[in-house]
Amino acid sequence: MYIIFRCDCGRAVYSKEGVASKKCVCGKNLKVKERRIIAMVEEADKASDMVRELQEEKYGGAYFTTADKIPNKR
C-alpha cells in the first residue's frame, strides 16, 4: 500500500505505508504520520501516476524541447 500526500512546498509525494519519514525533492524531511493523506493505492506505478497527475493539475503539464528552440535573452 502506498500513501500520497503533499509537502509544504506543494509537491505531491508518495511513500510506502509504514515508512516513518520521506525526503521531498525540495530537501525537507517529512514525517509521514503528520501529513494529511490525499490518497492510498496498492501499487507503486499507480502511486507514481497519481503523483504525476496531481503535479500537472497544480503546475500544468510538462513539455520537453531542445535547447536550440529556447529563445536567447542576451
Image: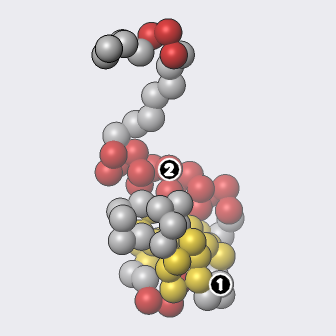
| Foreground residue among 45 and 26 | 26
Could you tell me the amino acid type at mark 1?
Answer: Val
Q: Quadrant of the C terminus?
A: top left
At a point 46% along the width and 28% down the height, the residue shown is 63
The image quadrant that residue 61 belongs to is top left
Residue 51 screen position, x and y as percent: 50, 57
- Quadrant showing the N terminus: bottom right
**Image point (68%, 64%), residue name:** 43
Name the residue carrying label 2.
52
Q: Is residue 5 above or below residue 60?
A: below
Q: Is residue 16 above or below residue 33?
A: above
Q: Is residue 13 visible?
A: no
Residue 48 x %, y %: 59, 56
Q: Secondary structure at mark 2?
A: helix
Q: Residues within 10 Å of mark 2 (few under 14, many from 20)?
A: some
- Residue 19, numbered label: 1
Q: Is label 1 in a helix, a strand or a loop?
A: loop
In depth, the one of 2 and 59 nearer the eye is: 59
